[in-house]
Amino acid sequence: MKTKIYILSLGLVLCNLLVAQQDCSASTATTTFNVTANVTAACSVVATPLTFGAFSPFGPDVMASNSITVTCSNGTAWSAGLSTGSGTFVNRQMTSATAPGTPLNYNIYTANTYATVWGDGTGATQTINDTGTGLAQVKTAYGRIIGPQATTHPANDYTDTITVTVTF
């Protein structure tokens, strides 16, 4: 054991003599580098069904609402528009598979005052606009079937499909 220590000590002394008193331990070199990422604007949207329930063609207006949830990256300005479905923005229309010629008129509005049609921003329609927070932002769509309507509507289920488009 003593022999190994002497050899190691002798090796360090010789190293220091040969390299003019410089450090004989291992040397290092260092550098730095940047780490970057670009967070892009992104949005997602989900909607619950707009379900009116029972409607009598002789009866009064029937109202219903649903939720449209938009989630956009923080600081991203967005606009949510709705399609016309089977009708127009003046009268969206639900149809029945058994009586396609007798549509049930309804519309979707931006507020429960039922004054402004939620559409694509053309004509008299408006979109809903906001700025993303990174969290879900829930907006309410207000639907109304105006009663009474033509009594020629057969008793059946009536449906329509609305597309929500979020532009950002």
Image: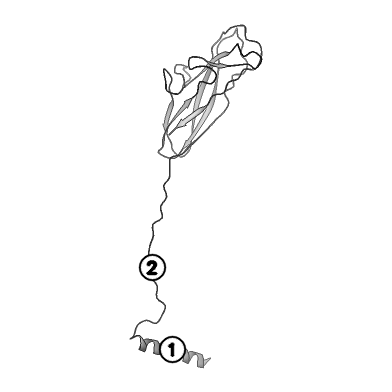
- Dot 1, how many residues are within 10 Å of its Cα: few (below 14), some (14-19), or many (20+)? few
Q: Is residue 93 above or below residue 2?
A: above
What residue sits 65% from the left and 17% below the top? 97
Residue 116 percent across, percent down from the top left: 44, 18
Q: Is residue 116 left or right of residue 67?
A: left
Q: Nearer the viewer, residue 135 or 157?
A: 157
Locate residue 135, reporting x and y percent: 48, 38
Q: Residue at x 60, y 20 (%)?
A: 159
C-alpha separation, residue under disc 1 versus residue under disc 2: 28 Å
Please state if 30 lies on the left or on the right of 112 as rendered: left
Q: Position of residue 42 (x, y in %)?
A: 46, 39
Residue shown at 45% from the left, 24% from the top: 120
- Residue 39 position (above or below residue 11): above
Three-letter amino acid code of the residue under disc 2:
Thr
Give 150 or 114, whichever is nearer the viewer.
150
Dot 1 or dot 2: first in sequence order is 1
Report the quarter where the C terminus lies. Answer: top left
Q: Which residue is mark 1?
A: 11
Q: Which residue is denoted by mark 2 in the rendering?
A: 30
Query: What amino acid type should be assigned to the residue bearing mark 1?
Result: Gly
In-front residue for pair 11/52: 11
Disc assigned to residue 59: none
Residue found at the far front of this picture? 101
